[in-house]
Structures are given as structure tokens and as C-alpha cells.
Image: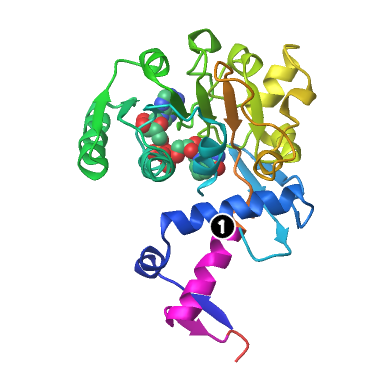
Amino acid sequence: MTLILNRSDVLALLRVEDVIAAVEQAHIDLAHGRAALPAPASAILGDATFVAMTAVSEPAGLAAATAVATRALARPDARVLGLIGAGPLAEAHAHALSAVHPFDAVVLWGRTPARSAELAARLQKDLGCEVRVLAGPREVTLASDVLCTLTPSKDPLVKGDWFLPGLHVNAVGAPPRPDHREIDTAGVARARVVVDSYATTMHESGEAVLAVAEGAVTGEHFRLELGEVLAGLEAGRQTPQQITLFNSVGVGLQDLATARLLIDQAVRRGLGTRVDLAA
Ligand SMILES: NC(=O)c1ccc[n+]([C@@H]2O[C@H](COP(=O)([O-])OP(=O)(O)OC[C@H]3O[C@@H](n4cnc5c(N)ncnc54)[C@H](O)[C@@H]3O)[C@@H](O)[C@H]2O)c1
């Protein structure tokens, strides 16, 4: 039996706090070996890259990963959230991170001023905190306690020279391609890096592949996985002054956790359309 859920079903069924909890559990399951996450196979056809992200998880569990990482790695006294990029992912991040951490202000920059202003107005209304559009990525980085990069930029928008002590960075936007990155090599090298999956990172993340190719760090710099920190197997942030960086490629396990949650809720509430494809 196939269950079909339309957009309004999904919106009615998913609460951000439930997705965050499910994704957190999925990463803990991965750290304990109760889930498996092979490096994705990718196929390149002209300008297009197809990345098949597969995962299996033993306990039902399962994109809230940035919120989970921020809760684990940001300083408890972090008060300013910075967003670089003003698209759908930036808006979703502002909501998800505000659900797990008390921010007093949001600062943001996007390439298109009108789109940035519209996002700032919506966030100010939705989150009820001060939201300001700043002049560029440097200004946002310098003003932030927690910084999220949320653009498909191929070349680094953010330089490590701008990082102030205690900053937590979520590098999220770069598409899963080894020649794309938002954070330069200096930024990666200065930070204690936590990844969603080591195998996927070394396969798909420009932040890792290019920093290693430039000789600034070795693959060991990207060994620490989020699940190991969440499970208490390894330390996350070690000092208040340390710069931490969550390098998010996006893994199928997070989608699986969210899908599991969605199906369970839909069945419980009798929502969706059931189609018997074998009939
Ligand atoms: N890590 C993950 O798990 C994950 C999950 C989903 C999406 N993504 C990636 O996040 C990115 C952002 O998603 P979105 O839906 O908000 O996209 P979007 O196309 O709306 O772009 C977001 C913002 O980036 C800006 N932008 C685009 N190209 C730029 C460039 N070269 N330099 C500077 N700014 C640029 C846009 O103007 C916009 O403000 C995409 O690259 C997507 O692949 C990552």
C-alpha cells in the first residue's frame, strides 16, 4: 500500500520540535551503529549531478539537523543569529533555530536587497525579535554568535579571518559537490569541525575536499560526527572561545527520520490517500 500525502497533509502533520527530536535520535542511532549511511553514489551528466542518498535505520527515527547541531555546539549565551542567503532555507533555519535557542536578534544578508527586506519583515513578525539587513557577508559574520550560510554559491562567501572567538557556524547551503563551498580554507582550518557523516563529507563537501587539497588540514579534521557528540561519545564545543563549525551536506538518514515521523502521524490521524499499486 502506498500512502500519498499532499502539502497541506504534511504541514498539518509535522511539528518542528518533533522533526528536531527525530533527526537528533537518527544521528545518535548512527553513532551507536544502529543506522547505516553509505557514502552517496553520484552520477554527472553535463552540468547536472545526481546524488542518490540512501540510508537504513533500525529504530524508526530519523531537516532539523542544523537546529540539533546548534543546540549541541553553540555557546549557551549566544544571542545574535546571522543568516547569509535569503531564500527558503534561510527562512526555515530562522524558525528551526529559534525553536531550540533564545536569540534576541537576527542579522541577514542576501544577494537581492528586495528579497532580503521581505524576509526580514516576515521574520520580525513571526519571531517577534529585532531583524536587520546588513551590507554583506562580512558584516553579518562579525555581528553573529551563530552564523548560517545558506546559498548555492560555488566560491567562498565567508572568510575565516572574520571569525570572532566563540562563534558557531552552520555551513549548509553549498550543494553536495566537491568543488562548491561557502567557507574558505582558513575558516575550516580555524574551527572544530563537526560533520553529519564523515564518508559523505569526504565524498561530497567542497569545504572538506578543497581544504584538504590545499594542504591546510587532513581528513582527520572532518572525522567528528554530530551523532558522536549527541550520544556523549565525543566532546562538542570544548571552550567558550572555541570556534565550532557544523558542516552539513545533508544525509538520507535525516529524510528517512522525517518520513518515518510523517507516516506514523498520518496513520495515527487517518490522513492521506492510500493507493494499492499492486491492485
Ligand atoms: N545541507 C543540506 O542539508 C541542504 C538541504 C537543502 C538545501 N541545501 C542547499 O541550500 C541552498 C539554499 O537553498 P534555497 O532553497 O534557500 O535556495 P535559493 O536558490 O533560494 O538561494 C538562497 C539564497 O542564496 C542566494 N544566492 C544564490 N547564488 C548565490 C551566489 N552565487 N552568491 C551569493 N548568494 C547567492 C540567493 O539570492 C538567495 O538569497 C541550495 O544550494 C541547496 O542545495 C542544503
| Quadrant occupied by the N terminus | bottom right
Question: How many residues crowd mark 1 within 10 Å: few (<14), some (14–19), many (20+)?
Answer: many
Badge 1 element: helix
Helix, strand or loop: magenta stretch: helix
Between 84 and 170, the residue placed more toward the observer is: 170
Please indicate, yes or no, whether residue 52 appears anywhere in the rendered image.
no
Q: Which residue is drawn at 51% across and 38% down?
A: 71
Residue extending farthest bottom? 279
Quadrant of the displayed image that contains ligand 1: top left
- Residue 197 point in image, percent of width and height: 70, 41
Q: Which amino acid does label 1 sit on?
A: Ala
Look at the image and say whether residue 266 sits in the magenta stretch: yes
> Which quadrant would residue 13 be assigned to in this image?
bottom left
Residue 169, image x and y in percent?
52, 26
> Is residue 273 visible to us here?
yes
How many numbered marks does the figure carry? Answer: 1
Quadrant of the drawing holding the C terminus = bottom right
Choose top left, top right, bottom left or bottom right for residue 125: top left
Q: Residue at x 38, y 70 (%)?
A: 9
What is the span of residues highlighted in magenta in the rendered image? 257-276
Magenta span has 181? no
277 over 171 or under it: above or below = below
Q: Nearer the viewer, residue 25 or 88?
A: 25
Locate residue 268 relative to residue 54 in the image: left or right. left
| Horizontal relation, residue 174 to residue 33: left or right | left
Left or right? Give the position of 144 relative to 19. Answer: left
**Residue 96, percent from left and from top:** 41, 45
The residue labelled by disc 1 is: 22
